[in-house]
Image: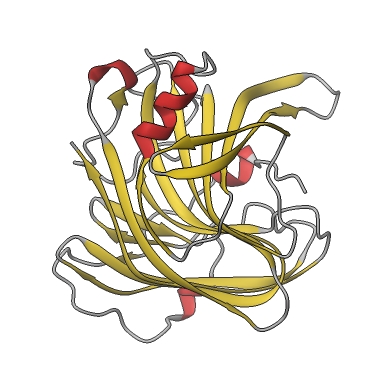
Amino acid sequence: MNHRRNLLAAALLAAPLLLVSQTATAAPALAADSCTAFNTVSIPPYYLNNNVWGAKNASGKQCTWLNSYRNGKANWETSFDWTGDKTSVKAYGSVVLGWHWGWMEKNTKLPIRMNSGRKVNSSWTFNITQNTPTEMNVAYDVWFHQKSNPDWQDQPHDEMMVWLNRQNGAGPLGTKRETVNSAGSTWDLYVGKIVNKDSSGKVTSSWNVYSFVRTANTNSATTDLTGLANTLVQKRLLANTSYLTSVEAGTEVFTSRGKLSTSSYSVSVS
């Protein structure tokens, strides 16, 4: 199954509707706007994004909310109930650090240049609830640009997805290239390409997509994201002059009803 990016939806992110301080101990009960498309919750240097980029031709809804943020670790959840084409992603409820068609939070320590020697690691512990068998993944989405200060109109040059868990046949864009050992785990590496066209069929943007799919599902991991990116550099798939501009983490949902509950999530940028 393939997933596709909807640039227009991504570019139309709503402004932050709820501000939560770094020392917040708990979020209120599920607020009405937690289910609003593209609602954001600020937890500097991160923000939560109720991203429903693929929902145009689907039926259902998604809600994304913060439970707590303590000592740099976020506890958050996203619930979903989608019907429609089982081969297309409906939503990506996620926590964002850095660029996402623009910058929402400051002091993210991003971007970093791949040949700078700086490291990006992330720790993530989560639980999946499936009320009905759900085609979904739990994955990072890491973006790269050729410039150090991309704005909302600047298209990415490369995208790296890191799948920690997949359920009921969900699969990445592209074709499998090989199985690799990197960042302390074994992964199937897929290579694909996003191509966006206008109504006349003219290509308006495109970028490479590299997906590391863990060969064994996990619900808790500390992942060396720059280690995986350097694997792409070593294989001459990614330029070492590229800038890592963003780390996102969440669940891509194809269909069905359930919830992703993150008990602890953090990113460390050296």
What's the residue at 56%, 63% (across, down)?
A: 37
Above or below, 224 relative to 85:
above
Placement of the C terminus among the 4 image quadrants = top left
Above or below, 140 relative to 32:
above
Q: Nearer the viewer, residue 208 or 154?
A: 208
Image position, residue 14 (x, y; %): 47, 54
Quarter of the view holding residue 251: bottom right
Image position, residue 80 (x, y; %): 61, 73
What's the residue at 27%, 33% (across, down)?
A: 110
Image position, residue 88 (x, y; %): 76, 52
Quarter of the view holding residue 209: top right
Above or below, 171 relative to 20:
above
Q: Is residue 155 visible?
A: no
Q: Nearer the viewer, residue 250 or 123?
A: 123
Quarter of the view holding residue 123: bottom left
What's the residue at 56%, 44% (across, down)?
A: 10
Image position, residue 134 (x, y; %): 70, 71
What's the residue at 43%, 83% (across, down)?
A: 30
Question: How is this picture coloured?
Answer: secondary structure
Q: In the displayed structure, does residue 32 sit left or right of residue 213?
A: left
Above or below, 132 relative to 4:
below
Number of marks drawn: 0
Q: In the displayed structure, does residue 217 sit left or right of residue 24?
A: right
Q: Is residue 42 visible?
A: yes
Q: In the displayed structure, does residue 138 sit left or right of residue 119?
A: right
Residue ranking furthest to the bottom: 29
